[in-house]
Amino acid sequence: MESNVLTQVFLPLSLAVIMFGMGITLKPIDFKRIFIFPKAVTLGLVNQLIILPAIAFGLIQLFGMQPELAVGMMILAACPGGATSNLITYLAKGDAALSVTLTAIASLVTVITIPIIVNFSIVYFIPGGEEQQLNVLNTVIAVLFITIIPVLLGMMVLKKAPLLAGNLERPFKIISTVFFVVIVVAALLKEKENIVNYFSQVGPVSLALNLATLGVGYFSARFLGLSIKQAKTISIESGIQNGTLGITIGATLLMNSTMTIPSAVYGLLMFLTSGILIYVGNKMGD
């Protein structure tokens, strides 16, 4: 019963709160910046939506992960960057406006791409996985209600009551961080009997994926002539994922706690590399 309350109530509600907190920082102009920074936004989205899942798929094959963990890693790779990527970009002296734009647009697009990538992964990695696939329509509706609608509500608060939104921003950042930590710890505790074995499989893949996507994001941006500031941003948006959403999909929509482990482990490693990113970002120029 406690597990059911955690996965069916607390997880979706926590994610909705986190996304509402992101929404009170967004304005309509954030969705229009694709026309202001077309090259940067397009590259960021390609890295996020295509290259990231492709790298994850390749690393899974290379390291030979067990099926459910492999699906969990692909769930993580299908998720957009979250509010965390915006904060890290700001602290690393990246382009905060570009970061918010990429997160906002990717969050909209992944409502459609998540069930496609996840269902492909289930069928590919799990024998007889056809019976375990996500219902596409139900998944789209669920992701809308726990991500997009809270974001839109947050944006509405910002538009109608900007002072209130400003007062809520800091508390919601703190609440979001606390919820994320609680969710990651809960996911790991759920599988505590297998955590050593799982971490030995997931840890190397997660670290390799994180470093690879950060590197690809930065150097692809520099190769295309974008500024260092924009390159730092695309790097962070490519390598920092919404682990809370990944855990929610695995635990709530697929009801498989093993599939939540990659998002939990990645979340832990992500914060370690983020500290390095912030340090290096402050040493670099614009």
Image: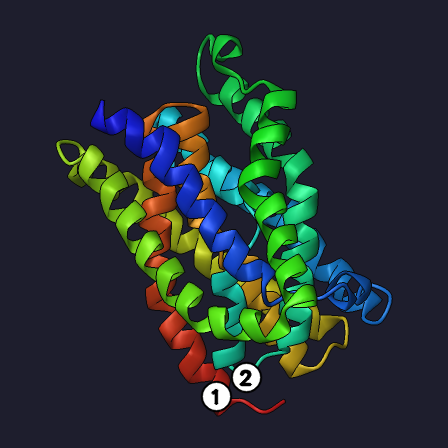
Count neighbours of disc 2 (C-alpha within 10 A) and say few if under 14, some if 14 to 19, many if 20 or more. Answer: many
Task: Name the kind of residue labelled 1 in the image.
Answer: Asn
Badge 2 marks a residue whose secondary structure is loop
Task: Name the kind of residue labelled 2 in the image.
Answer: Lys
Disc 1/disc 2 C-alpha distance (Å): 6 Å
Quadrant including the C terminus: bottom right
150 relative to 37, above or below: above
Q: Which residue: 77% across, 77% down?
A: 225
Instruction: Return the x and y of residue 280 as percentages of the image width and height.
Output: 45, 83
Instruction: Return the x and y of residue 211 as percentages of the image width and height.
Output: 45, 61
Q: Which residue: 33% across, 46% down?
A: 264
Instruction: Return the x and y of residue 194 as percentages of the image width and height.
Output: 17, 32
Disc 1 target residue: 282
Quadrant including the N terminus: top left
Badge 1 marks a residue whose secondary structure is helix
| Residue lying furthest left | 193
| Coloring applied to the structure | rainbow
Residues 174 and 86: in front is 174
Count neighbours of disc 1 (C-alpha within 10 A) and say few if under 14, some if 14 to 19, many if 20 or more. Answer: some
| Disc marking residue 93 | 2
CB under 8 Å between discs 1 and 2: yes
Q: Is residue 108 left or right of residue 184?
A: right
Q: Which residue: 38% across, 76% down?
A: 276
Asked if residue 265 can be seen in this view, the reply is: yes
Q: Which residue: 61% across, 64% down?
A: 217
